[in-house]
Image: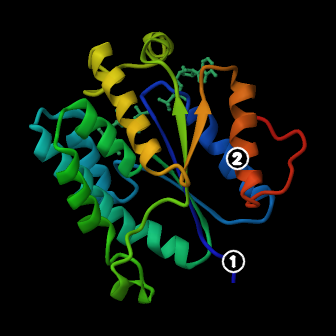
Amino acid sequence: MTTGLFISFEGIDGAGKSSHIEGLAQAFRDQGRVVTLTREPGGTPLAEKLRALMLHDAMDPLTEALIAFAARRDHLVQVIEPALARGEVVISDRFTDATFAYQGAGRGFDWDQLSILERMAQTGTALQADLTQNFMREPDMTLWFDLPAEVAAERLATARVPDRFEAQPGEFFARVAQGYARRAQAAPQRFVRIDANNSRHAVWQQITQAVIRKGWLAFMVGNKP
Ligand SMILES: Nc1ncnc2c1ncn2[C@@H]1O[C@H](COP(=O)(O)OP(=O)(O)O)[C@@H](O)[C@H]1O
Ligand SMILES: Cc1cn([C@H]2C[C@H](O)[C@@H](COP(=O)(O)OP(=O)(O)O)O2)c(=O)[nH]c1=O
């Protein structure tokens, strides 16, 4: 049976993730894989309700972090683990690195305490014998869209009505970007840095090259979003 694959898209708001996520899903489908395309916070009916709270209601950083992990736990148990067990490709628009970047680096919530919550939320969700080995679910690959905060702000200025995070000042996103860099440095085998300060086509090429390098997709001709 085909092994499941878990890929997350990360980066500050406006970095260009949404512009490419469906393209990557389609590239996998074109090569015969079943894809579960999902997002965080969200991905289940319960987690989508928690997403609405997180994005629109004022709360303190601990509450925000707990809601993010509660939503993630439900998402893992209901959607991600079953899809991986079926051998599918799971592509998630954000995962735990976002909590470290936004609630940790952005809001100033303690990094070590986030690591404890991460372990609690992402352990014991798999159906396999991993349960006994304290296995913690993480993406197999994280595509990190790295873009200076001021460029992302320019892109977003005309793009959409801001939510509670997108309405934050530039310094907040500069901190969030540093949070992503810190996570990338701590897990270089999982992270692939995408230089998002490029044309859409150049960004897409970096994405496909990363996945092809892993042997997860064969070379693709003319597959550009
Ligand atoms: N490479 C690019 N160059 C210029 N603008 C881009 C590029 N990629 C995306 N955009 C635009 O920037 C905005 C934010 O992109 P989006 O994909 O929604 O980012 P994210 O999902 O990371 O928040 C959108 O208006 C999108 O059309
Ligand atoms: C997953 C996650 C997202 N977020 C934030 C980042 C984004 O600003 C927001 C929603 O993400 P996103 O889906 O990228 O927003 P949009 O649909 O507007 O592109 O939630 C956190 O603060 N913590 C988290 O753990």
The one nearer the camera, 199 or 74, is: 199
The one nearer the camera, 172 or 193, is: 193
Examine the rendering and report whether any part of residue 165 can be seen.
yes
Find the residue positioned furthest to the right. Answer: 221
Q: Which circle marks residue 219 in the picture? A: none
Residue 202 vertical position relative to residue 140 in the rendered view, above or below: above
Q: Position of residue 183 (x, y in %)?
A: 40, 44
Q: Which residue is mark 1?
A: 2
> What amino acid is found at the position of numbered circle 2 in the picture?
Ala
The one nearer the camera, 223 or 116, is: 116
**Label 2 Cα crowd, 10 Å radius (few <14 / some 14-19 / many 20+):** some
Tell me the element at label 2: helix
Examine the rendering and report whether any part of residue 67 can be seen.
no
> What amino acid is found at the position of numbered circle 1 in the picture?
Thr
Q: Nearer the viewer, mark 1 or mark 2?
A: 2
Q: Residue at x 35, y 75 (%)?
A: 125
Q: Residue at x 48, y 75 (%)?
A: 82
Q: Horizontally, is 141 left or right of 212 in the view?
A: left
Residue 116 vertical position relative to residue 81 in the rendered view, above or below: above
Q: Residue at x 47, y 24 (%)?
A: 14
Q: Are marks 1 and 2 in contact (CB under 8 Å)?
A: no
**Label 1 Cα crowd, 10 Å radius (few <14 / some 14-19 / many 20+):** few
Q: Which residue is mark 2?
A: 210
Q: Earlier in the sequence, mark 1 or mark 2?
A: 1
